[in-house]
Amino acid sequence: MDSVSASRIVLFPFMSKGHIIPFLQLARLLLHRGITVTIFTTPANSPFIRHSLADTDASVVDLPFPQNVPGLPAGVESTDRLPSMSLFLPLVNATKLIQPDFEHALQNLSGVSCLVSDGFLGWTQKSAEKLGIPRLVLFGMSNYSATVSRVVVLDRPHVDLDSDDEPFEVPSFEWIKLTRNDFESPFKDPEPKGPLFEFIIEQGIATSKSQGLVVNSFYELEPLFLDYWNREFDPKAWCVGPLCMAEPPRVEPLMKPIWVQWLDTKLAEGGTVIYVAFGSQAEISSEQLQEIAIGLEKSEVNFLWVVRSKGLEALEGFEERVKGRGVVVKEWVDQREILDHESVIGFMSHCGWNSVLESICACVPILAWPMMAEQHLNARMVAEELGVGLRILAESGSVRGFVKWENIEKMVRELMEGGKGKEVRKKVKEIGEAARRAMEEGGSS
Ligand code: UDP
Ligand code: UDP
């Protein structure tokens, strides 16, 4: 292991919580193997990274974020700080201006054996080639979503359909029925084009030139999709996850956050809780937020709801009425601490890939309610492919659209108390166990 212990791996995550977190977990795995780890980021994202890795020897390098970028409010260096996801492109394009500083800093580091950078930072491929450093890409998507979307984009089975809700079969995976609504524009468009599409193609080309993909997943979870990817597509993919299992055992803090104290109380009473959260950047309309509130209130189950979007204020007396059995949290929480809490037996989730894996590792079944990005595919995977969760659909049966409180109430009850809930709870325990085995010494990851 001498040659390994002498080496340094440079990590460069994209600027959003959902992208940074798996990189921090990967950093821990590498440090555990005696590898020197240096993480590149920008000043506004640096405090979160430094704080998360404060107990480790990882070093963090801050590169200045471009100033006065048209469209971007000053100080915003992360997608979860964007006033709207419509500013995604200005943000990712701004990162390209970091290239000279990145290369300069990289050149000044000794013993760099490899760069692991985000799939959205395709420009780092050029830097890696210029400096003769191999690059691996950490994309943070499941093999299922990556493979299925690649197959659909190439074979285009979704072009000649009457509506965005009409099901079509995925070539090579005939048991998978999708609709155009399972994809975002430009993927769902018959003739994909425009700046976002160009950006995606550009990143795809850069990724294909890299040495390979390290995937936050494990082989036993999705063998067909990983094998298919490695047979048909480039670059080669390796599963190294679930990365959330790399986190050190939690030390009980002197003062637990009040919502965790509340979970303790519920557990002592013999109660169970559904955890409700939609990730670090989902945009939910105030009408839909209020409908969720009513659904949770009527369901009569205990709930812990993390909600950072605005709109709940308009629902008069809600928090008062659910006092004792419902808690609304507006702060950043330690999601894994909540999912691992014994009282939590269900997770209403937007199905961001990190959340899906964290839920599986905690053996908590999911009530899938995807919002954007590849979350709809993750939700299909959760409910239809793996059977570790149930699905919330709009009244029309569409995977998008407004969901009425009656349906929310019904599905919450089904997950927490119903027969289908029982089935998916059993299944998630099996898969959670498989995840643990994959991450053990000698396991597939
Ligand atoms: N997260 C957290 N506390 C919060 C909100 C999110 O710890 O209050 C973490 C969550 O555990 C996950 C990540 O942030 O690791 C969110 O990633 P995910 O892929 O689930 O969704 P995204 O935020 O990227 O949509
Ligand atoms: N921050 C910022 N712009 C960004 C991202 C972060 O100004 O694009 C600031 C943020 O206001 C905070 C610090 O950087 O002072 C750390 O932010 P983070 O989101 O990591 O933690 P939080 O504010 O949620 O505790």
Image (cartoon, rainbow, N blue to C red):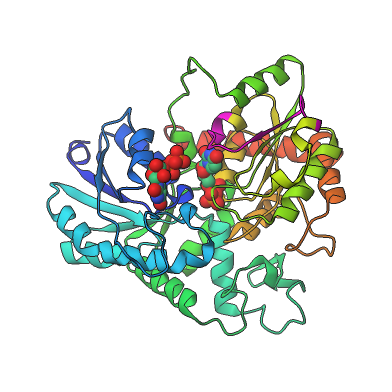
Residue 389 seen anywhere in this rendered image of the structure: no
- Quick one: 89 or 149, which is closer to the camera? 89
* Above-or-below relation of 97 to 142: below
Q: Is residue 345 magenta?
A: no
Q: Residue 433 sits in which quadrant?
A: top right
Q: Name the residue: 33% across, 63% down.
A: 95
x and y, in percent, of residue 22 in the image: 44, 45
Q: Is residue 331 left or right of residue 310?
A: left
Q: Is residue 185 left or right of residue 385?
A: left
Q: Is residue 30 left or right of residue 291?
A: left
- Quick one: 395 or 112, which is closer to the camera? 395
x and y, in percent, of residue 347 in the image: 68, 39
Q: Quadrant of the C terminus?
A: top left
x and y, in percent, of residue 356 in the image: 60, 45
* Above-or-below relation of 390 to 327: below
Q: Quadrant of the N terminus?
A: top left
Q: Name the residue: 47% across, 53% down.
A: 81
Q: Is residue 330 magenta?
A: yes
Q: How many marks?
A: 0
Q: Is residue 91 left or right of residue 242?
A: left
- Quick one: 252 or 380, which is closer to the camera? 252
Q: Residue 163 sits in which quadrant?
A: bottom right
The residue segment tinted magenta is: 321-337
Residue 187 seen anywhere in this rendered image of the structure: yes
